Image: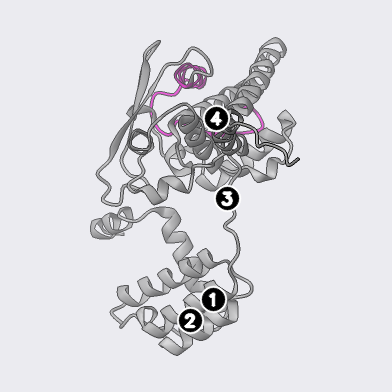
Amino acid sequence: MDRVEQYLAAAERENTRRSYAAAVRHFEVEWRGLLPTTTDEICRYLADHANSLAINTLRQRLAALSRWHVDHGFADPTKAPKVRKVFKGIRSVHAVAEKRARPLEIEVVQRIDQWLDQRMDEAKTLQDQGALLRHTRNRSLLLLGFWRGFRSDELVNLRVENVQITPGEGLVCFLGSSKTDRQSLGRHYSCPALSQLCPVTACQAWLSLADLTQGPVYRKIDRWGRVGQQGLNADSLIPLLRSLFRDVGLEGSEEYSSHSMRRGFATWARDSGWDLKSLMAYVGWKDVKSAMRYLDVSDASVRAKFESSLASLASLPALAKDS
């Protein structure tokens, strides 16, 4: 690969390249479609998979096929009005509620943190270095992921040399790119030291225990307790977290994902009085629509709003009874 190709590859996220390649392979190999293709064939492809694939998956498949045609110098058949109309019809006929990750509440974070603290003490007593490393890494990953509202790709792309920790004050980390940083301009993320559930102390403890001075912050740990050189893969975070939650004994562990930390923090911040502008700036959302997808209104909060208004009815004079 020459330098031009290296820079072209670096301009696109690895997850995007993999998913686009899988989409093209699905069209050509599994569906036996021919590329370049036509508008009618695109419509038939969508219709054939309208029952079996989610709307977001179909949208991603269209984006991949569009990219293939553009990259190879062909007219893009996915942009035809007929394709848009067929896709709109599929959304109408096969409308389903969007599956969203269960938010990780602050009380649950506290419970997991206490469990990890106990397991770390046990590992020290038993001199089980592998278990101590895993629990220390998971604690740092959980607390930093929650308090920073990081996505999975942001967590796994953190590098030790780009993390500056000031004990008792906070940490600042730099990410060269992320899902919302389309131009790859990079951004600094800060996180304060806290009196409880502190992400700064947890991160410092992990880096010190693993003796990490450069490279990925969060890495695999083998069965012999050896810390690997490669960072965790973004796709590995969901099974890692669900396994941890099962060990803790959380009900419905399969309902959680790496997005649960982000959604949980957003819910906590809103309930703690953060205004939407401050929350968007902290997390990195560019538009209100993106932010609102992560904000859940609790049943208790809704009920409190109703009851606060209904309370004024008690002051009204009682109606006279008919004689």
Compared with 312, 239 (above or below) is: below
Residue placed at 47% from the left, 36% from the top? 266
As drawn, the label of residue 20 is none
In the picture, measured across the screen, residue 96 lies left or right of residue 206, that is right
Circle 4 packing at 10 Å, graded few (<14), some (14-19), many (20+), is: many
Give the CA separation, mark 3 to mark 4. 19 Å
Q: Are marks 2 and 3 in contact (CB under 8 Å)?
A: no
As drawn, the label of residue 100 is 3
- Badge 2 amino acid: Val
Give the CA separation, mark 4 to mark 1. 38 Å
Residue bearing the label numbered 4: 142
The part of the chain drawn in magenta is: 199-225
Does residue 143 show up magenta in the picture?
no
Give the CA separation, mark 1 to mark 3. 21 Å
Please tell me whether mark 2 sits on a helix, a strand or a loop.
Answer: helix
Give the CA separation, mark 2 to mark 3. 26 Å
Horizontal and vertical percent position of residue 186: 28, 40
Residue bearing the label numbered 2: 86
Q: Residue furthest front?
A: 323
Compared with 56, 240 (above or below) is: above
Horizontal and vertical percent position of residue 163: 36, 26
Q: Are marks 1 and 2 in contact (CB under 8 Å)?
A: yes
Residue bearing the label numbered 1: 90
Q: Nearer the viewer, residue 264 or 203?
A: 264
Say whether disc 3 or disc 4 marks the residue closer to the N-terminus. 3
Residue placed at 47% from the left, 49% from the top? 293
Does residue 208 show up magenta in the picture?
yes
In the picture, measured across the screen, residue 142 lies left or right of residue 85, that is right
What scheme was used to colour the molecule?
one colour
Please tell me whether mark 3 sits on a helix, a strand or a loop.
Answer: loop
Q: Nearer the viewer, residue 291 or 151?
A: 291
Q: Quadrant of residue 16?
A: bottom left
